Image (spheres, rainbow, N blue to C red):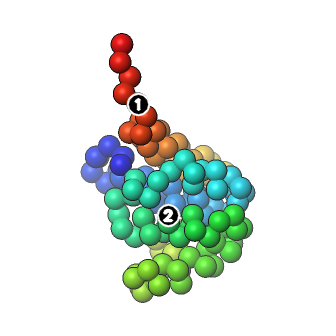
Amino acid sequence: MVPNRPGRNEQLERDTLRFLCSILIQPTTRGEILGLLDGSQFSDMVCRVIFEEIRSLGPVPSRTLRELLPARIANRGFPDFDLKDFLGNSSASESEVEELYMSVLEMIEVRHREDGPALTN
């Protein structure tokens, strides 16, 4: 899980999911990033379900991903889920994508710090 900072965890999770749904990344890139993350890193249940569904859809184009996610999230117990409200605009600018990517890197770093062996001198 990401270090506990009020509001920061939720924002990191949402930014990571927004990046994963971005039309500016390729499906294979998304798959590689998904392999570096784990659902247990998402403390918000909706975020965790979205992450799991993105991963289960595999390497589909982001437009297809965004079309399929709402029904899949509703089937997982969130019938009022609105992807557009949750993630915001589907077309992030290149500079926004860079910022979103930094959120992904932070989550990856935290996961590998938690999973890695303890360093001793």
Q: Of residues 96 and 40, which is closer to you in this image?
A: 40
Percent x, y of residue 107: 46, 46
Vertical comparison of 106 with 12: above or below: above
Q: Of residues 84 and 70, which is closer to you in this image?
A: 70
Which residue, given by chain and number where applicable, does mark 1 sit on? 117
Percent x, y of residue 67: 63, 79
| C-alpha separation, residue under disc 1 versus residue under disc 2 | 26 Å
Q: Residue at x 40, y 30 (%)?
A: 117
Vertical comparison of 77 with 30: above or below: below
Indicate the quadrant containing the C terminus: top left, top right, bottom left or bottom right.
top left
Q: Residue at x 50, y 64 (%)?
A: 51
Tags 1 and 2 in contact by the CB under 8 Å rule? no
For the residue labelled by badge 2, is the local secondary structure a helix, a strand or a loop? helix
Mark 2 residue crowding within 10 angstroms, few (<14) / some (14–19) / many (20+): many
Residue 96 visible? The answer is no
Query: Which amino acid, mark 2?
Result: Phe
Q: Residue at x 38, y 22 (%)?
A: 119
Could you say which disc has been placed on residue 8 in the image? none
Q: Of residues 57 and 93, which is closer to you in this image?
A: 57
Q: Residue at x 42, y 64 (%)?
A: 48
Percent x, y of residue 68: 61, 79
Residue 32 visible? The answer is yes
Give the mark toward the camera: 1 or 2. Answer: 1
N-term-proximal mark, 1 vs 2: 2
Mark 1 residue crowding within 10 angstroms, few (<14) / some (14–19) / many (20+): few
Vertical comparison of 75 with 107: above or below: below
Q: Is residue 70 left or right of residue 48?
A: right
For the residue labelled by badge 1, is the local secondary structure a helix, a strand or a loop? loop
Query: Which amino acid, mark 1?
Result: Pro
Could you say which disc has been placed on residue 51 in the image? 2
Percent x, y of residue 4: 28, 46
